[in-house]
Image (tube, helix red, strand yellow):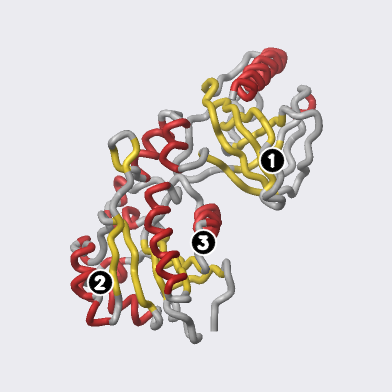
Amino acid sequence: MRLPACTVWTAGHTALDRPAPPISLALGIFDGVHRGHLQVLDAALADARRRSGLFAVLTFDPHPSRLLRPEAATRLFTPPAEKTRRLLEAGADCVLWKAFTADFAAIRAEDFLARLKKWLPSLAAIFVGENFRFGQKRAGDIGVLQATAPALSLTAHGIPRLEVEALPVSSSRIREALLAADLPAVAAMLGRPYSASGIVLPGRQLGRTLGFPTLNLPWAPELTPPFGVYATTVRDLRNPGAPPLPAVSNYGRRPTVSPDDAPLLETHLLTPACPFTTGSEIEVAWHTHMRPEHTFPSLDALRAQIQSDTAAARALHQAT
């Protein structure tokens, strides 16, 4: 029986307890699902199609650093729902989320593949990045996988790291670029612009009062770009064929009007009409950091700045 496409399973509670075709499994954290990750995913996809099998992805929550070094835990920049969507868009037939627990971290590296085989009886091949580490004290590497795979009738594949500007593409490099608001560098490593997605929520209508109505998205991954104003584009996730629309966005706490609120992504379309309403599912792509967030002395001063930001964003879009 073939599992239906775009199924999301939770691994670790029970094995996939139904007959399944051979599984080619990509294994990793995949924060951002960047160009380097795509090399691993593409290799697993090609193997699955060659076998007429299933392309599955196994990832983890929380990030292992939350357990292993909580004082310096890695902050992820891709929320779980978006990561799942990106993995499915990369061709995965199913995405399996495994809780990263102390028991899981204590598995001996030499026993790791046997445990995976128990969870996934039809597992045929495993694909990881060449720097992937696993098992007790992170002692496992691709060498251990390739040494233990044959006895389980498996193949194990380590995929070389991709380089951009003579350095390996990595989620760590992307995090550094995001914190610096270096969006071109982020896009070069992701293979697409950095983006935020979600359901448009009703707001306080302040933007409309100021003459600049906005689409409001709560957006709070563990790591985000700096608060500020960005030239952006917006696309309709429920209508993939529709072109992205030019926009300007403010991400932050809106210190002039509501400094105690949670961070919010507010986006004003630069088109005559807005095709989106409350409840629309959109993706906002961030292209250029225009300025940091400021507190203004009055709503009139804020309105004047928004007018300036809108004109600047329009010029940026026209120049590209």
Q: Residue 107 carries which label?
A: 2
Q: Is mark 2 on a helix, strand or loop?
A: loop
Q: Identify the mark nearer the N-term, 2 or 1.
A: 2
Are dots 2 and 3 in contact, CB under 8 Å? no
Count residues near mark 3 (Cα–Cα under 10 Å), then give few for <14, some for 14-19, many for 20+.
Answer: some
**Residue 72: x percent and y percent?**
30, 45
Count residues near mark 1 (Cα–Cα under 10 Å), then give few for <14, some for 14-19, many for 20+.
Answer: few
Q: Mark 1 points at which residue?
A: 243
Q: Is residue 253 left or right of residue 245?
A: left
Q: In this view, does 170 lie to the left or right of 80?
A: left
Report which quarter residue 172 is drawn in: top left
Q: Name the residue under label 3.
A: 91
- Amino acid type, mark 3: Gly
Q: Is mark 1 on a helix, strand or loop?
A: loop
Q: Identify the mark nearer the N-term, 1 or 3.
A: 3
Can you say which quadrant of the picture contains the C terminus? top right
**Residue 8: x percent and y percent?**
54, 68
Question: Label 2, label 1: how many angstroms apart (C-alpha)?
Answer: 48 Å
